[in-house]
Amino acid sequence: MKKKLLTVFGLIFLTMVLLPVFVLSADVPMMTKEQLKAMLENPDLVLFDVRMGSDYFSSDLKIKGAVRPDDFICIPARRYPKGKTFVIYCASPNEAKSTADVKHLIEEHGKDGFNNTNVFVLKGGWEEWLKAGYPTEKK
């Protein structure tokens, strides 16, 4: 009886945690690590490192060319001219933080030029980039 109850609570917990992530990321454009690597030297690329707390501070590395927004992502993004390609990455394996930032940029600031064709989440985030051995640099 306890095992069944524990299983039910486990399924409820997973549903509560995972469902919002899938719903959140359903309509957010993604970019693969391979696509980003191919774009690294493109002057129209703006790469934002939005890793939170210890995920950011526990490493002295970032993806080559990435900038860290000082404040909410929309404010620094507006400083760039239209026509730039924005890629946002975090440390979450399901891109939760990046997805929320991209959704906000597209939904709330579409009039400012942020849309599904120029704002992306790095699929797999920081961990996948690091595992692939792709270019990093000191912060």
Image (cartoon, rainbow, N blue to C red):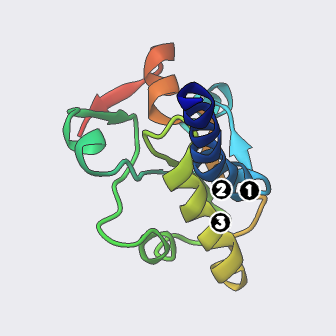
Question: What residue is disc 2 on?
Answer: 20
| Residue 95: quarter of image | top right
| Frontmost residue, 1 versus 130 | 1
Question: What residue is disc 3 on?
Answer: 103
Instruction: Tell me where residue 9 appears, x and y as whole percent.
Output: 58, 42
Q: What residue is shown at x 61% (from left), y 52% (from top)? A: 16
Q: What residue is shown at x 40% (from left), y 41% (from top)? A: 65
Label 2: how many Cα within 10 Å (few below 14, some 14–19, many 20+): few
Label 2 secondary element: helix
Label 1: how many Cα within 10 Å (few below 14, some 14–19, many 20+): few
Q: In screen coordinates, is 138 left or right of 51?
A: left
Label 3 secondary element: helix
Q: What residue is shown at x 35% (from left), y 62% (from top)? A: 69
| Residue 127: quarter of image | top left
Q: Earlier in the sequence, mark 3 or mark 2?
A: 2
Cα–Cα gap, marks 3 and 2? 13 Å
Q: What residue is shown at x 30% (from left), y 30% (from top)? A: 137
Q: Amino acid at mark 1?
A: Val
Label 1 secondary element: helix
Question: What residue is disc 1 on?
Answer: 23
Task: Check whether the beta carbons of the residues at disc 2 and disc 1 lie within 8 A of each other.
Answer: yes
Q: Amino acid at mark 3?
A: Lys
